[in-house]
Image (tube, rainbow, N blue to C red):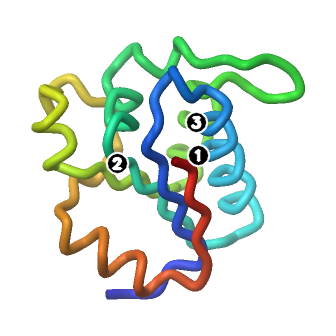
Amino acid sequence: MKSTDLLITLTGDKREENNVTIAFTMALTAKKKGLDTDLLILSYGTYLMEKGYAEQVDIGEPFEPVKKLMDEYLALGGKISVCNACLKHNGIDVENLVDGLDIVDAEYVVDALMAAEKTLQLN
């Protein structure tokens, strides 16, 4: 597996809106700095990947709404990896996910963590 400059893991959904916002803010900031960045979504975080869900997360100034951060991150070529087992466990239909995601398995998660230069974990 190719090394990633920054791997950000996120397990929270709108109930942890501060961590969600920080994860997307840092991912976008890293991408703007030219870093190879992977935002790894696990556990309840998978709900954020459903169409319409991210619009519910906006903690206000000085932060941007999560949907805006996500859209800009993806538009810049940012990578979002989503745990397939977590999707299934949470009853999320892959047909209802936002575009541009990579669906990954546990082997990918372990390999990505081991190959990353730096990690930021928001749980």
What residue is shown with label 2?
42
Q: Nearer the viewer, mark 1 or mark 2?
A: 2
What residue is shown with label 3?
20
Q: Amino acid at mark 2?
A: Leu
Which residue lies at the image location 42% right of the left edge and 76% below the top edge? 113
Circle 3 Cα neighbour tier, 10 Å, few/some/many (<14 / 14–19 / ≥20)? many
Q: Amino acid at mark 3?
A: Val
Note whether 19 is above or below 47 in the view shown.
below
Note whether 4 is above or below 71 in the view shown.
below
What residue is shown with label 1?
73
- Mark 2: secondary structure: loop
Which residue lies at the image location 11% right of the left edge and 37% below the top edge? 88
Q: How far, Cα to Cα, is label 1 from label 3?
A: 14 Å
Q: How far from the left and from the top, in percent, is residue 37?
A: 55, 66
- Mark 3: secondary structure: helix
Q: Residue 51 has which mark?
A: none
Q: Amino acid at mark 1?
A: Tyr
Which of the marked residues, 1 or 2, is nearer the chain's N terminus? 2
Q: Are marks 1 and 2 in contact (CB under 8 Å)?
A: no
The answer to which image quadrant residue 100 occupies is top left
Horizontal side of 20 relative to 26 (left or right) equals left
